[in-house]
Image (tube, rainbow, N blue to C red):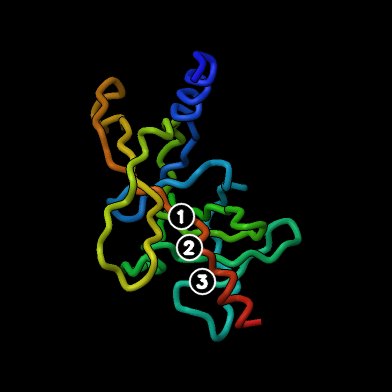
Amino acid sequence: MTAASVQATEAVDDAERKIVTFLLGKQTFGIDMSALIEIREWEDPTPLPSVPAYIKGVTNLRGHVVPVVGLAERLGWEPSVLHARSCILVVNIGGKHAGFLVDEVADIVSVADSAIQPAPEVEVTETSVIRGLVEIGQRSQDSSDNKHQIMVSLLDLEKLSPTRHLDLAA
């Protein structure tokens, strides 16, 4: 290998991506910013009959009907308790839009691809929705200068896609 190809390989390994981090309960999750369309304030969606309980309904996004998923329920957790910071992350999944109810958006951070660790292999009832794990620095509540490391679970949006259920309901 030439020196230029070694540098190119290292540049690919050290590529960075922006991650939108958010909270569900006390757990921090992240999604790739390239999938994010917008962050919306919570508003009650229009309910749909005969869909899984985690599909809260649909909302109108500039003339497009977008399903709204209760992410905590989709992950098998207790439903999120709505409050002033609850919001919907509208994302693009394979050319279709979906909204995910989250407790609050935390931050947008840059992470090196090489810092993302694979999700641990554990027995689950369905394919894991965790694409990987990354440790990031987060400001502590008491002082903006102090940072501590937190583990962020990166979600695989393709595996969370609600569109197959909406196709059945239509």
**Residue, disc 1:** 156
Select label 2 or label 3 by which is in front: 2
Question: Outermost residue toward the front?
Answer: 1
Query: How many numbered circles does the render carry?
Result: 3
Taking depth in this image into account, of 134 and 89 the one nearest to the observer is 134
Are dots 2 and 1 in contact, CB under 8 Å? yes
Q: In which quadrant of the rendered view does residue 21 lie? A: top left
Q: Residues within 10 Å of mark 3 (few under 14, many from 20)?
A: many
Horizontal side of 159 relative to 137 (left or right) equals right
- Label 2 element class: helix
Q: Residues within 10 Å of mark 1 (few under 14, many from 20)?
A: some
Horizontal side of 121 relative to 61 (left or right) equals left
**Residue 167 x/y as whole percent:** 63, 77
- The residue at 43%/37% (across/down) is 107
Q: CA distance from mark 2 to mark 1?
A: 6 Å
The amino acid sitting under disc 1 is Asp
**Residue, disc 3:** 56
Q: Is residue 150 above or below residue 94?
A: above
**Residue 140 x/y as whole percent:** 26, 31
**Residue 6 x/y as whole percent:** 48, 20
**Residue 4 x/y as whole percent:** 54, 15
Question: Outermost residue toward the top?
Answer: 3
- Label 3 element class: strand
Q: CA distance from mark 2 to mark 3?
A: 18 Å
- The residue at 58%/74% (across/down) is 164
**Residue, disc 2:** 159
- Label 1 element class: loop
